[in-house]
Image: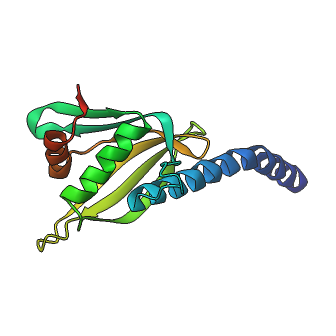
Amino acid sequence: MRKLLVVFAALAAIHLSPAFSAERDVIDRAKLAFSDQLQLICSDTGEYDWIAENAVYQYPLHDIHLKLRVEGRDAISRHLRALSEVAPKTAVEDVTYYPTLDSDIVFVQYDLVSGEGRNERRRVAGIIEMHGDQIASFIQLNSTRENLKVMQTVPARVN
């Protein structure tokens, strides 16, 4: 009986190891791309290689019952640069990634910390969909005042 349990445990580990490997892979890809996003890293040619060409970023704006939706690499890079200018001292801390059953989707949770002297900390959750090493979709599940300011100053599609 003991040998049977050992064999069963070994078989389960063999079958589960690809799933754990896939989880680590998508989390590693998402960590790298999201880190590049936070630092607004671009290539030598000025391209934001961690954003897919047809990517979509969405942010709900609960206070005014709107959803900000930015589509395409160029529009997203302009949006993120504008966001960093509107709130240059805002920091992202305590980033945690969670795998899902989809090998290209992770949940991300982090703290947005205002550096405007108030040191406000707000927990944010989001969904990142990866296509290879690029973010194809980012859905923030919480609204921010900064996104509202960007929406008012930068042309973006509002749904």
Q: Percent x, y for residue 1?
A: 87, 51
Above or below for 113 versus 139: below
Q: Count up the numbered dots.
A: 0
Q: Give whichever of 16, 123 is nearer the camera.
A: 123
Q: Percent x, y for residue 91?
A: 29, 66
Farthest residue, direction front:
45
Farthest residue, direction bottom:
117
In the image, is 55 to the left or to the right of 132?
left
Above or below for 136 versus 37: above
Residue located 25% across and 51% down the image: 82
Residue located 54% across and 57% down the image: 44
Residue located 47% across and 52% down the image: 46
Question: Can residue 138 be seen here?
Answer: no
Q: Percent x, y for residue 70?
A: 32, 35
Residue 96: image quadrant is bottom left
Question: Can residue 89 be seen here?
Answer: yes
If the image is split into quadrants, where does the C terminus sit?
top left
Above or below for 17 versus 91: above
Residue 95: image quadrant is bottom left
In the image, is 137 to the left or to the right of 19?
left
Q: Give whichever of 84, 127 is nearer the camera.
A: 84
Farthest residue, direction right:
3
Residue located 14% across and 50% down the image: 145
Q: How is the image coloured?
A: rainbow
In the image, is 56 to the left or to the right of 123?
right
